[in-house]
Amino acid sequence: MSAIDLLLQQHQQVEGLFQKFKAGGEDRIQLIGRIAEALTLHAVLEEQYVYPMLKQHGMDEDFDRSEEEHAEVKQIISQLLRMKQTDGQLETVMDQLISNVRLHVGLEERAVFPRLQAAADPKRLEEVGRDMEQAITKLGHQELLKMAEHQEQPVIS
């Protein structure tokens, strides 16, 4: 699977989690944890594998904007993870997260990913996709929620 295909798949997964949160029914704090974990994993993969490709192909503006958007999302996730289910601001902060992520995803899917796909060697995108899949396995054994809460960056070896 190419790096871009893997990221698109993760976008769909996160959107599904957002819809579950909005529908209610599940333990909201547990769902926030799942969302935080999925977004943290996704951000790590983009930052460590895809963003260097953006720089390599002269997509510096996309890189800079994406870095800023990730920083904002990480701050919101950290805030959410410290909130209690009874906190009156929970819904507002979650709405802010959903809005920011959807804006970021929309830009990636409409502009960034198509430009990267046109610029990068398809074989290289497949290689990076495989590397990302291996990283997912390694990261599954790390404490993604702790990293999200403290805005830490894991080291994938």
Image (tube, rainbow, N blue to C red):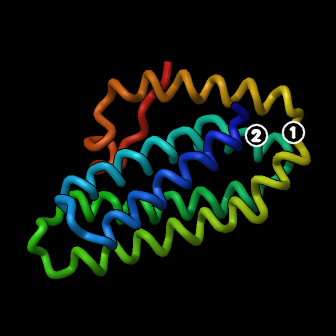
Relative horizontal placement of residue 13, taking residue 34 as reference (left or right): right
Relative horizontal placement of residue 68, taking residue 114 as reference (left or right): left
Numbered marks: total: 2
Classify 10 Å Cα crowding around label 2: few (below 14), some (14-19), many (20 and above). many
Spot the residue most to the top: 157
User: What is the x, y in percent for residue 77?
Assistant: 34, 59
Is 84 drawn above or below residue 31 in the view shown? Answer: below
Quadrant of image for the N terminus = top right
User: What is the x, y in percent for residue 125?
Assistant: 77, 33
Mark 2, secondary structure of its residue: helix
Can you identify the residue that label 1 sits on?
Answer: 120
Can you identify the residue that label 2 sits on?
Answer: 53
Residue drawn 50% across and 71% down? Answer: 100
What's the residue type where badge 1 is placed?
Ala
User: Which numbered circle lies on residue 89?
Assistant: none
**Nearer the N terminus, badge 2 or badge 1?**
2
Residue drawn 39% across and 58% down? Answer: 17
Is 32 drawn above or below residue 124 in the view shown? Answer: below
Residue drawn 76% across and 46% down? Answer: 54
Q: Which of 48 and 31 is in front in this view?
A: 31
Task: Find out whether the residues at labels 2 and 1 contact each other: C-beta distance under 8 Å.
Answer: yes
Residue drawn 12% across and 65% down? Answer: 84
Q: Distance between the residues labelled 2 and 1?
A: 8 Å
Q: Nearer the viewer, residue 98 or 78?
A: 98
Q: Which of 137 and 66 is in front in this view?
A: 137
Instruction: Please identify the quarter of the rendering in which residue 37 is found.
Output: top left
Mark 1, secondary structure of its residue: loop
User: What is the x, y in percent for residue 25?
Assistant: 21, 66
